[in-house]
């Protein structure tokens, strides 16, 4: 893994090089930006650079061949701590931070960070899914905050999330925030081909235009079934008079096709609500006199909606907010059928009346 494999973030690489060269590397960082743009990959690369046994730290250029580099790449380095939200959980479990009940404060990330490095110059912790650190877990929250406030010597903590607003205020105040931008379309297309995810360069370019700079989104859209459903969803949303009750009958079965378990179905619902958010975001732009951004199906749907939309951009903004709210309700484990029905009904109400919906 070399820096040239991490496209689109040269600015952040240089930012870290300057900080290390000046001896001003902070102890805690919060990486924020849209999903699927390489924040976790960047964090691993940074850890590899700092733990490399051959390169000087200020070079920030790991050799990639020493035992330390290989262990970081394999995520087995003894001085590297990795924490993420399990797919079947709605938040990061308490025990990952402070240990299980019978080993409380004698295992887990906070305890491991307090130990001396095993073979490297420092211990490094990467906390993925930082959006799902629960403030309700008071004991874990207090321990983590104490670790952030008084980090152990020779330690580095990297939290990876999607936005500053989704983090606990106490975590934001104790972290240096690094903002990652969406990837350029050409970078997404190049990565899709170079990683063997898409064989046809033209198909990769098309997916890149819809990706909003996210590899995760591009790979989701490569799913033919999802692409076909997107067409029907855009057709439904572009017609304010469409029957939301009838359309809901097709949404539920499509979600169920994602798998028997809840996690893949929740992912699919997030994708559907995200498609809705994309549509209303571009409709807002069109109603405001701005050019529509997106691929041909999205542009066509927004143009059709613009011709028959009887409300202003504020109503479109309300629909966008409802889509984003629905995504949050998925994370809160809302009932699938009820959420889908309510979402479509609320969008129809706003589209027809221009007023809000009861919450």
Image (cartoon, helix red, strand yellow):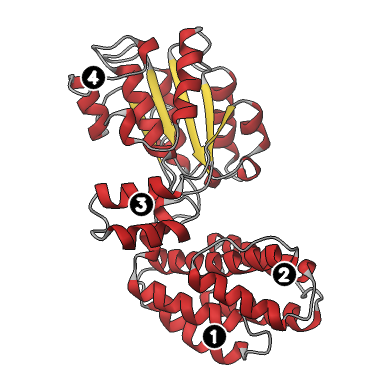
Left or right of 80 in this view: 271: right
**SS label for mark 2:** helix
Q: CA distance from mark 4 to mark 3?
A: 27 Å
First in residue order: circle 4 vs circle 3: 4
Q: CA distance from mark 1 to mark 2?
A: 20 Å
The residue at which mark 3 appears reads as: 189
- In front: mark 1 or mark 2? 2
Left or right of 119 in this view: 333: right
Instruction: Please give the label number shown on residue 248.
Output: 1
Q: Residue at x 36, y 52 (%)?
A: 189
Whole-percent x and y of residue 172?
A: 63, 32
**SS label for mark 3:** helix
- In front: mark 4 or mark 3? 3
Q: CA distance from mark 1 to mark 4?
A: 54 Å
Q: Residue at x 39, y 62 (%)?
A: 206
- In front: mark 3 or mark 2? 3
First in residue order: circle 1 vs circle 2: 1
Residue closer to the observer: 209 or 67: 209
Q: Residue at x 22, y 24 (%)?
A: 64
């Amino acid at each position: 893994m070399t820096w040239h494999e991490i496209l689109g973030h040269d600015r952040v690489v240089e930012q870290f090089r300057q900080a290390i060269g000046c001896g001003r590397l902070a102890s805690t960082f919060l990486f924020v930006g849209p999903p699927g743009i390489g924040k976790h990959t960047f964090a691993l690369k940074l850890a590899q650079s700092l733990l490399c046994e051959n390169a000087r730290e200020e070079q920030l250029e790991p050799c990639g061949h020493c035992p330390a580099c290989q262990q970081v790449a394999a995520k087995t380095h003894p001085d590297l701590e990795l924490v993420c939200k399990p797919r079947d959980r709605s938040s990061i479990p308490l025990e990952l931070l402070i240990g299980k009940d019978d080993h409380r404060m004698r295992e887990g990330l906070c305890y491991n960070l307090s130990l001396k490095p095993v073979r490297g110059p420092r211990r490094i912790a990467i906390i993925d899914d930082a959006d799902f650190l629960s403030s309700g877990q008071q004991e874990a929250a207090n321990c983590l905050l104490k670790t952030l406030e008084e980090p152990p010597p020779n330690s580095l903590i990297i939290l990876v999330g999607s936005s500053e607003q989704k983090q606990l205020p106490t975590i934001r105040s104790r972290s240096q925030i690094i903002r990652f931008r969406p990837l350029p379309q050409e970078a997404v297309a190049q990565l899709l081909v170079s990683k063997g995810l898409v064989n046809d360069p033209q198909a990769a370019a098309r997916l890149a235009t819809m990706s909003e700079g996210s590899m995760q989104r591009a790979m989701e859209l490569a799913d033919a079934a999802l692409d076909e459903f997107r067409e029907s969803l855009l057709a439904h949303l572009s017609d304010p008079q469409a029957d939301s009750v009838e359309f809901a009958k097709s949404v539920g079965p499509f979600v169920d096709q994602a798998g028997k378990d809840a996690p893949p179905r929740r992912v699919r619902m997030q994708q559907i609500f995200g498609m809705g958010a994309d549509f209303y975001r571009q409709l807002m732009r069109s109603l405001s006199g701005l050019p529509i951004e997106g691929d041909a199906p999205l542009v066509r749907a927004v143009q059709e909606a613009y011709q028959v939309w009887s409300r202003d951009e504020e109503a479109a903004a309300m629909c966008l907010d409802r889509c984003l709210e629905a995504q949050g309700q998925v994370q809160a484990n809302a009932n699938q059928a009820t959420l889908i029905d309510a979402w479509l009904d609320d969008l129809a109400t706003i589209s027809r009346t221009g007023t809000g919906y009861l919450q």
